[in-house]
Image (tube, grey):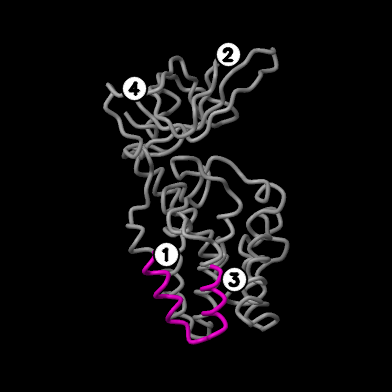
Amino acid sequence: MQISEISEERGFEGFAAVVSAEKRVASNGRGYVDLVLTDRSGYTDAKLWQDVDAPSAGCVVFVKGVPDKYRGAVSLRVCEMREAVTEDGVNVEDFLPHSPEPVDRMKLCVLETVASFRNDALRDIVSEMIAMAGPSVWTRPAALQMHHAEIGGLMHHVCSMLECAECIAGVYPFLDRDLLLAGVVVHDLAKTREMNLNGLGLVSDYSADGMLTGHITLGVCAVAEASARTGHGGCEEEMLLRHMVLSHHEKPEFGSPVPPRFPEAHVLSAIDSLDAVMFEMEDVLKNTAPGTMS
């Protein structure tokens, strides 16, 4: 069975990869293990209510568990768990969620888009920000467990948004196409600094920078740094990109201290939210039986 099949009525028995595992102490003083498990179908929070050592993040474990509902969310109460051995014949790669698009194809999509910019400042700044993000940007997930929490998830998110943005720019020709697409490419690049990866290439937790600063503020700083490095410091394009990164979550309660204040920034915020919600809805619908509600 798959992790995505866990429900209020159905537990789980099978192999899964350990995204994170931490030994903790309950209010009664007894130790337990808090886990996040994954396979190709999705993620689940899990707890093993035994005072044992936590398995290593990145390993594969065999798990038997029953559903555990808390505050409306269903997780897994683990009854039995052991690390996989050679005789089990399992490969950790088989349990990792991947973007449906090959990484090389997504990389080409992004680089060709940036190369198509007629605005030199935008092309230079965005290219520098991609370089600053490092080579792992092409394979990184976009989140710990939410939307696009998969190998290549960050670029999957960006490429889907680029396709939406190109269509919207065609419908509303007064939009600055280069600026809109530049905002799409850079808006989440600072997630490479916000989140740590485990040995699986999945997000294990938030970095100190991520906890104390967050990808929005880190992204604004990256725009300024890339602009200075490329000789475009203080230009109008830098100011507009900084605002787009700062406002792409739209509201203070979602993490943006200012709302989008020009058309391209508003479109960026809208398609960012749309793509995240559509990803999550599609993920849920794939495992929802006809005639039932998720």
Specify which label sits upstream in the sequence, 1 or 4: 4
Give the SS element for disc 3. helix
Q: Residue at x 67, y 51 (%)?
A: 209
Circle 3 sits on which residue?
A: 266
Q: Quadrant of the N terminus?
A: top left
Residues at marks 4 and 3, CA–CA distance in whole angstroms: 51 Å
Residue 126 colored in magenta in the image? yes
Q: Amino acid at mark 4?
A: Val
Nearer the camera: disc 1 or disc 3: 1
Residue 22 on image: x %, y %: 58, 27
Disc number at residue 51?
2
Q: Amino acid at mark 2?
A: Asp
Residue 148 on image: x %, y %: 46, 51
- Closest to the observer: 253 or 137? 137
- Closest to the observer: 114 or 5? 114
- Closest to the observer: 33 or 240? 33
Nearer the camera: disc 3 or disc 2: 2
Give the SS element for disc 2. loop
Disc number at residue 159?
1
Nearer the camera: disc 4 or disc 2: 4
Magenta-colored segment: predominant secondary structure: helix
Residues at marks 1 and 2, CA–CA distance in whole angstroms: 45 Å
Q: Residue at x 36, y 22 (%)?
A: 13
Q: Is residue 90 above or below residue 142?
A: above
Mark 1 vs 2: CB contact within 8 A? no
Q: Is residue 198 visible?
A: yes
* Mark 1 Cα-neighbour bin, 10 Å: few <14, some 14–19, many ≥20: many
Q: Which residues are magenta?
A: 107-129
